[in-house]
Image (tube, rainbow, N blue to C red):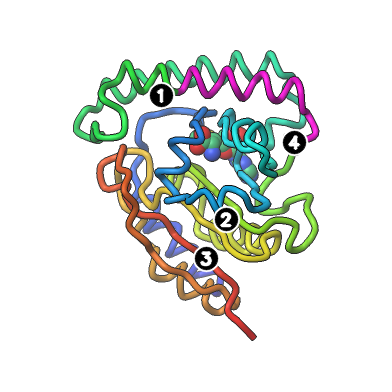
Amino acid sequence: MDARRVMDSQQRLRSAVPDSGIGAMLVSARSLAEYRAMFALSDAVVRRRLLDCPGGAASLTAEVNAAGGDATACDPLYAHTSVDELAARAQADTDRGNRYVRAHPEQYRWSFFADPDEHQRSRYAALTRFTADRRAHPERYMPGVLPRLPFADDAFDLVLSSHLLFSYADRLDPAFHRDSIGELMRVTRDELRIFPLVAMGAVGYPDLDQLLAQLAGQGITTEVADVDYEFQAGGNQMLVCTHRPG
Ligand SMILES: C[S@@+](CC[C@H](N)C(=O)[O-])C[C@H]1O[C@@H](n2cnc3c(N)ncnc32)[C@H](O)[C@@H]1O
């Protein structure tokens, strides 16, 4: 894409994805149960070599490994943030995210969580598991910054990416989305799943067709799949990316 078209695309994103008012990017703490629902994960899928990027303070890695699986988390914050510092930041962000949810009821659906109290309890529980596991198994928490990751080609079977791409489209431009998906695909042998496809503020990503066309040009096959989970209104789809054969 030439520079003019990139600028046009960024301009459209800026106007189409308004500032949600959330402020700094949240460090959130989702549980394995929430990941299973968001990504329609079966038991067989959970037994593969998994990468959670960004891992944030999610407990997917802790819970999968405790059950005998093989999961790794990757996030920029694992580089210079101690276990206790990250736990404190994620706790503050859990409270900030929960206040946002309570202040914007029109943007949320209460099927996975019964109410805002359960939302907060679930995130605290995930954060507690994450913190204990990061303390006990620091090697499972690899620092890394998209769009460049510190892993070999095909290091994982399945990569899960939750609540970075698309979620923060008010501040992450189309080139970042394209390059990050290309990099996440480089490190997966089989598949990448991304959730959700709406931004904070429950706004749809405006340039999805253009992005999918670019990915097709890079040999990446994509499918938008419905999932049986909706917390942000309209956030009930994931993007499944695979390598085009040949
Ligand atoms: C909203 S949290 C999502 C965490 C987790 N996936 C979850 O759903 O609970 C967003 C995370 O993205 C991380 N992040 C920000 N920029 C990133 C980048 N360039 N590459 C990888 N992760 C990034 C942040 O540090 C933060 O932990």
Amino acid type of the residue that numbered disc 1 sits on in the rendered structure? Gly
Q: In screen coordinates, is 233 left or right of 21?
A: left
Q: Residue at x 71, y 25 (%)?
A: 134
For the N terminus, give its image quadrant. bottom right
229 or 166, which lies in front?
229
Closer to the N terminus: mark 3 or mark 1?
1
**Above or below — where is 193 with respect to 20?**
below
Give the residue at mark 3: 241
Segment tinted magenta in the rendering: 123-141
The residue lying furthest to the bottom in this view is 246
If the picture is divided into quarters, which one holds ligand 1? top right
Label 1 CB, ligand 1: below 8 Å?
no
Residue 103 placement: quadrant:
top left
The residue lying furthest to the left in this view is 106
Q: CA distance from mark 4 to mark 2?
A: 25 Å
Secondary structure of the residue carrying tag 4 is: helix
Look at discs 2 and 3 and give the one toward the viewer. Answer: 3
Residue 67 placement: quadrant:
top right
Give the residue at mark 4: 140
Q: CA distance from mark 3 to mark 1?
A: 29 Å
126 or 153, which lies in front?
126
Principal SS element in the magenta part? helix
Q: In screen coordinates, is 233 left or right of 78?
A: left
Q: CA distance from mark 3 to mark 4?
A: 24 Å
Look at discs 4 and 2 and give the one toward the viewer. Answer: 4
**Above or below — where is 177 with respect to 141?**
below
Give the residue at mark 2: 176
Specify few, some or many for label 3: CA neighbours under 10 Å numbering under 14, 14-19, or 20 or more.
many
Label 4 CB, ligand 1: below 8 Å?
no
Q: Residue at x 61, y 44 (%)?
A: 52
Give the residue at mark 1: 97
